[in-house]
Every structure is written in C-alpha cells, then in structure tokens.
Image (cartoon, grey):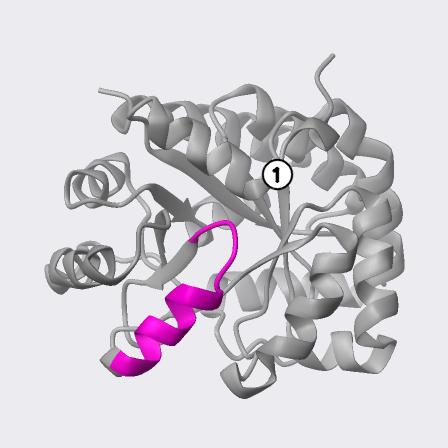
Amino acid sequence: MVSVSDYSVSGCMDALRDRGQCALIPFITAGDPDLETTAKALQILDRNGADLIELGVPYSDPLADGPVIQAAATRALQKGTRLDPVLEMLKQVSPTLKSPIILFTYYNPILNRGIEPFFQQIAEAGAKGLVVPDLPLEEVEGVLAAAKSTGIEVTLLVAPTTPKERIETIAHRSQGFIYLVSVTGVTGIRTEIETRVQSLLTDLHSVTDKPIGVGFGISQPGQAKQVMEWGADAVIVGSAFVKRLADGSPEQGLQAIETFCRSLKAAISQ
C-alpha cells in the first residue's frame, strides 16, 4: 500500500501537470458528522478520484466559510471536535492514503498553540500541506520558516480583489500551488462560475510558473471542467462535498461523496 508519506503537495501537483492532468481537491470538515465518518470519507475520496484532500479543522469564527461549511463546523464543535482529536484521527488514517492531506485552519488556533509546535504536530499526524485563509501576508515569513523545518508546504490565497503587486509577492511565497479564490466573498455552492476567473488565471500564469488551484463556488462537474479549460491546474470543491456528507445517515453521505467525487474526476479527465 502506498503511504501519503511518499507524496508532497508540490510533488503531486507537478507530477499531474507533467502528465497534462488537472488535480481534483475535495474539501471536507473534520468531525461532521463524527471523526469516524471523517476517516472513512478520506479513504473513500482517496480511492475515487481525489488527488489531494483538504481537511478543515472546525473553528468558531470561520470568516472565509459560507453557510454550508459554517454549519458543519458548528455541528462538529458541538460534538467536541478539536484539533488534537482531528490530528489523532489523521495519524491513524494517513498511512492508508496516497493523496496528500492539506489542513485548512485559521491563524488564531495556530498562534494559540505556538507556530512551531503546531507544525510539528500536524507533520507527525501525516499532513503535508496547510491553508490559512486569514494569514496576513506580513506575517508569512515566520510561518514559512516553521513549516520548512517540518516539511509542510503552506499554500497562500489570491483573491479577485488582490492588487497585482501583491499577487506577485503571494505567488513567489506560496508553496505547493497557488490558491485562487474564484469569488469575492465566502465559500458556497453557486450555479455559475464568474467568467473573470479566466482572466485571473491568465494574469497569474503570466507572473508565476507554479500550479494554480481554483476554489470557492465550484459545485458541479461542468463547472470543474470549465475552470480546467480556462487554465486551472487544480479544482477545489468544498461546500458541495460537505453538504452531501451531511445529508441522511453517515452511510448515505459516504455513498453520495463517492459518486460525486467520481463524477468530478471524470469531468476533468476528458
């Protein structure tokens, strides 16, 4: 069995791009409906088309998350899901996965734990990447230094409103890939992807040769294919997975995300 330890985020992204393939990155919220189901969900996504997986750590003030993911985080927190149990679960399941795990968390929990201890703990649990949506660019260097010592790659976000000179700085510092936020606002399920994503991708590719992943708002196979055709190296799908996993019983949710993951992968593999 291939272990996640054999893959880095950048290594996975580069290998896919070398083969002319677009990466699929599902997002789920840890602990919704429970951590046992989260572990099963990671394995199901890993077996059914996910190339990397984003795992959200529940947080009480999720500024970048829309109503679906906020509700999932609230349910998980109410059931007692905290960072330590999430990492313990991940430590158990990560040796069974080939997809690198990218943790998604906010900056305050990292500061509260201590930047260096935080990175040591997530690395020991098997995480390979990190996304911190509210990490100020001015404080990135200290985080990147701690990340480097543990082999964690920190992916930074570019928004539609980000000034060009700041985009170049973010592109230079981002690791693994660059996370392009497709909308101004929070995550969520949308019926259409804004056409300006195409020009944003063109602008980003003009200043960096790093892979670019597009997220926020992608909820259908057709949208994933459109974003790929516009030049994305990865499509990131969150709320649509979280919603399916939360509907019905845990078994029904797991079956739903398996089917959905396959359909997304098929759409970007044509």
The kind of secondary structure the magenta stretch mainly shows is: helix
Residue at the disc numbered 1: 8
For residue 212, side relative to residue 10 (left or right): left
Tell which of 267 and 115 is nearer to you.
115
Hey, which residue is sitting farthest top in the picture?
1
Task: Give x and y (percent) for residue 192.
Answer: 17, 55
Q: Residue at x 52, y 80 (%)?
A: 63
**Does the segment drawn in magenta span residue 238?**
no
Dividing the image into 4 quarters, which one contains the N terminus? top right
Q: Is residue 112 above or below residue 257?
A: below
Task: Give x and y (percent) for residue 153.
Answer: 61, 54
Dividing the image into 4 quarters, which one contains the C terminus? top left
**Does the segment drawn in magenta span residue 168?**
yes
Q: Which residues are magenta?
A: 165-177
For residue 95, side relative to residue 236 (left or right): right
Q: Residue at x 67, y 45 (%)?
A: 128
At label 1, counting other C-alpha atoms closer than 10 Å, the crowd grade (few under 14, some 14-19, many 20 or more) is many
**Can residue 81 be seen from the camera position used here?**
no
Q: Residue at x 58, y 76 (%)?
A: 62
Hey, which residue is sitting farthest bottom in the picture?
138
Q: Residue at x 21, y 45 (%)?
A: 227
Task: Give x and y (percent) for residue 67.
Answer: 47, 69
**Can residue 230 be seen from the camera position used here?**
yes
